[in-house]
Amino acid sequence: PLEPTSFDQVIKKRLKHISPILSLSYKEPIHMVRSAFQYMYDASGNTFLDAYNNIPHVGHSHPKVVNAGKKQMAKLNTNTRYLYEELAAYAEKLLGYFPPPLNKVLFVNSGSAASDLAIRMANNHTESTHIMVMELGYHGNTQTSIDISDYKFSNPKGQGQKQHIIKTPLPDTYRGKYEKNNPNAGKLYGTDAVTQIKNCGVPISAFISEPVVGCAGQIPLAKGYLREVYPAIKAQGGVCISDEVQTGFGRLGEYFWGFEAHGVVPDMVILGKPIANGHPMGAVVCTDQIASSFERGVEFFSSFGGNPVSCSIASAVLDVIEEEKLQENAKKVGNHYMALLKNLMPKYPCIGDVRGSGLFIGCEIVKDDSKIPDTALANHIKNELRRRHILVSTDGPFDNVIKTKPALCFSKENAETVVKAIDEILKTHYNNV
Ligand code: PMP
C-alpha cells in the first residue's frame, strides 16, 4: 500500500507528472481521502458537504454499489465476446426505463465515447455528415465530441467551428431573445431553429443537445422548443440525440430522463456519469433501425464496454434508485432547495435567476437588474462556501452561475445548510460594500 502522503507531497508529485491542463478546483486544492454518500473527507479530517458532484449519483461509496463491484470482480470479468448473463440482464433492465422505439443499447466507458459513437451511428444511418449542435453544449473530450461541443470549439483557445457543424442558438429564457414572461418563448425559439434547418442548404444527419445545457450555466431548453425542432430534423431525414449524461437517471425529480420534460422521444440517447456511480461506463441507446444500419458496417468492439463488473455496478445503481426512492427524493429536496434559493432573490439583487429541476440547479449571479454577470461575486460565494466546508462549482460563459447537483440522497437539511451559508456570505458581502 501507498504510504500516507502529505498535501505538499501529493501536489508536488502531481505537478511533476501530470500536465496542468488537467485543472484543480480552488486556488488551494482540497486533498480528499474518503467519501460517503453526500460527504467527502479531506486529509486533515474535515467533513465537506458535497453539493456539487453528480457522478456519485446514489451517494459516494454507496455500500450496495461497492459490494456489487467487489463481488463481480472476484467472480468474472471479461469482454463481450463471451456469453455472460450480466450484460443481457442489465441491457434489459436499462431499456425498461425507455419508451419505444428505443430498444437497443451499446456500452462504452465514458460519456465522450458514447457521444462519439452516437455521431458515427447517426452518420451511418442517415448517410450524411452535417450535425446541428446547441450553442454552448458540451459532449466530451474525443475529437468528434469536441467538434460537436460549442463550449470547447468556440473557446478562444479552441479549434473553431468545423464546416460540417451547424450551431443553433440556445433557447435561454433568462438571457435570450425570448424571455420567461413570453408564454410562447419555446415555440418561438423552435420556429427560429426550424427556419435555420430549412435554410441551411444541406441535409442534417443529427441534432444533438442536452435537455438542460450544463456548461452554458444550467440552462433548461425553453419548454416547447424540442417539440418544434425534433419533427423538423426527422422530416428532413436526420436523427435527434438527447445527451442525458448530466440529466439522466432521475436527477430532474419529475422525470427519469430530460427529454420526457419536453414531451418528445429522441432517436438516440447518450448516457454516462451517473450510470455506474463513478465507475467508468457510458452507453448509447437507440432504435432498432439505427442499430441495424450500424450492423451493416465494420464490427463494433469495446474491450471494457459492458463488461460483467460494469454491468453489475450499473445494475446496483438502478436498484438503489428504486429501493431508496431517489427520484422522488430529488423532486422533494430539489423543490425545497430551489424555493429556499428563490427566497433569497428579493433580499439580494445579485441573484438574477434560480433555475433547474430536481437536484440539478443553477443560480446566476449578476450585478443587479441589468443582468451584467458578476463573475467575481460568484467565485467569492464558491470560495466562501468551501471555507465553510461546502462544495459547489461555477460555470457558464461568464463563469457566474453557481452549479449545484448533489447526490440524490441529499436531504432537506443539507439544502438548508447550503442556503443558510449563501445567505450569510451575501449578508457579509453587502455589509462590506
Ligand atoms: N456529455 C455531457 C453533457 C457531459 O457533461 C459530459 C462530461 N462532463 C460528457 C458528455 C462527457 O462525459 P465523460 O467526461 O464521461 O467523457
Image (tube, grey):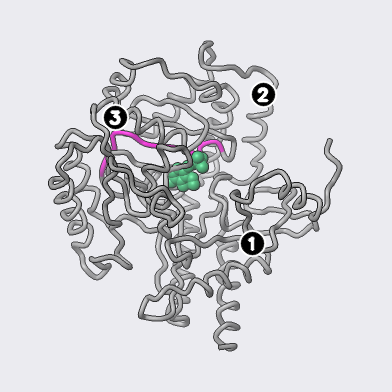
Q: Is residue 166 left or right of residue 155?
A: left
Helix, strand or loop for disc 3:
helix
Residue at the image position 37 percent from the left and 32 percent from the top: 118
According to the image, label 3 marks what residue?
123
Measure how far apart labels 1 and 2 are at the Cα level. 35 Å
- Nearest to the observer: residue 392 or residue 127: 127
Tell me residue 25's x, y (percent).
62, 57
- Kind of residue at disc 3: Asn
Q: Does any atom of ligand 1 lie closer than 8 Å to the CB of label 2?
A: no
Q: Is residue 249 visible?
A: no
- The span picked out in magenta is 264-276
Residue at the image position 67 percent from the left and 18 percent from the top: 75
Measure how far apart labels 2 and 3 are at the Cα level. 36 Å
According to the image, label 2 marks what residue?
73
According to the image, label 1 marks what residue?
26
Is residue 272 located in the magenta-colored stretch of the structure?
yes
- Of labels 3 and 1, earlier in sequence is 1
Q: Quadrant of the N terminus?
A: top right
- Kind of residue at disc 2: Met
Label 2 neighbour load within 10 Å: few <14, some 14-19, many 20+: some
Helix, strand or loop for disc 2:
helix
Measure how far apart labels 3 and 1 are at the Cα level. 40 Å
Residue at the image position 58 percent from the left and 88 percent from the top: 431
Q: Is residue 426 visible?
A: yes
- Nearest to the observer: residue 419 or residue 244: 244
Tell me residue 271's x, y (percent).
44, 37
